[in-house]
């Protein structure tokens, strides 16, 4: 599909939209379990290195960063509901290692999960 506005030509390939959407949907449906680069690159019909370049080009993030951030966002939702421990939430959103979950959570939010949970409960109270 060619778009032309004011002398600027941009070619958009529909397969790229379909491919990235397929990847996003896969992550959304499977974030609770392990997602390997091999699985996702096969889904995208690409080699692992080609997929990594493709994904970084389209999202400005590595695939691993994207998955970790998606999982943290899911954890934030569960923390807001307030009926589970941080450890339970970490496992539920796909983090098998609690210290890795803490590190990723702090990288995304700027706070530890427990501090975030306390501040959420103070806001609610």
Image: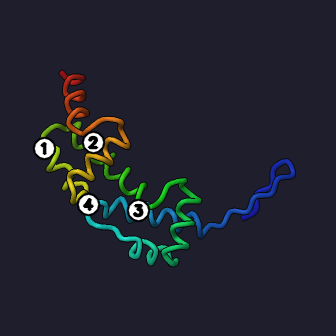
Q: CA distance from mark 2 to mark 4?
A: 14 Å
| Nearest to N terminus: mark 1 or mark 4 | 4
Image quadrant of residue 66?
Answer: bottom left
Residue carrying label 4:
32
Tag 2, which secondary structure? helix
Image quadrant of residue 64?
Answer: bottom left
Left or right for 32, reference 12:
left
Q: CA distance from mark 1 to mark 4?
A: 16 Å
Left or right for 35, reference 98:
right
Tag 4, which secondary structure? loop
Residue carrying label 3:
25
Indicate the position of residue 7 as horizontal and vertical percent values. 87, 52
Q: CA distance from mark 2 to mark 1?
A: 11 Å
Q: CA distance from mark 4 to mark 3?
A: 13 Å
Tag 3, which secondary structure? helix
- Whether 46 is drawn above or below 56: the answer is below
Q: CA distance from mark 3 to mark 2?
A: 19 Å
Tag 1, which secondary structure? loop
- Whether 9 is drawn above or below 79: the answer is below
User: Is the C-beta separation of discs 2 and 1 under 8 Å?
Assistant: no
Indicate the position of residue 117 as horizontal and vertical percent values. 21, 34
Question: What residue is at 30 percent from the left and 48 percent from the top?
Answer: 74
Can you name the residue that lies furthest to the right here?
Answer: 7
Q: Which corner quadrant holds the C terminus?
A: top left
Question: What residue is at 54 percent from the left and 60 percent from the top?
Answer: 56
| Nearest to N terminus: mark 3 or mark 2 | 3
Left or right for 92, reference 72:
left
Residue carrying label 1:
84
Rendering colour mode: rainbow
Question: What residue is at 19 percent from the left and 29 percent from the top?
Answer: 118
Q: Which mark is residue 77?
A: 2
């Amino acid at each position: 599909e060619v778009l032309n506005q004011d002398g600027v030509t941009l070619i958009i390939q529909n397969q790229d939209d379909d491919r990235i959407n397929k990847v996003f949907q896969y992550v959304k449906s499977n974030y609770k379990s392990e997602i390997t680069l091999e699985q996702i690159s096969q889904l995208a019909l690409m080699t692992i290195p080609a997929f990594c370049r493709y994904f970084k080009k389209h999202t400005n993030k590595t695939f691993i960063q994207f998955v970790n951030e998606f999982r943290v966002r899911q954890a934030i939702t569960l923390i807001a509901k307030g009926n589970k421990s941080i450890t339970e939430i970490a496992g539920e959103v796909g983090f098998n290692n609690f210290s890795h979950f803490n590190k990723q959570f702090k990288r995304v939010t700027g706070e530890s999960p427990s501090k975030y949970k306390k501040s959420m409960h103070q806001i609610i109270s």
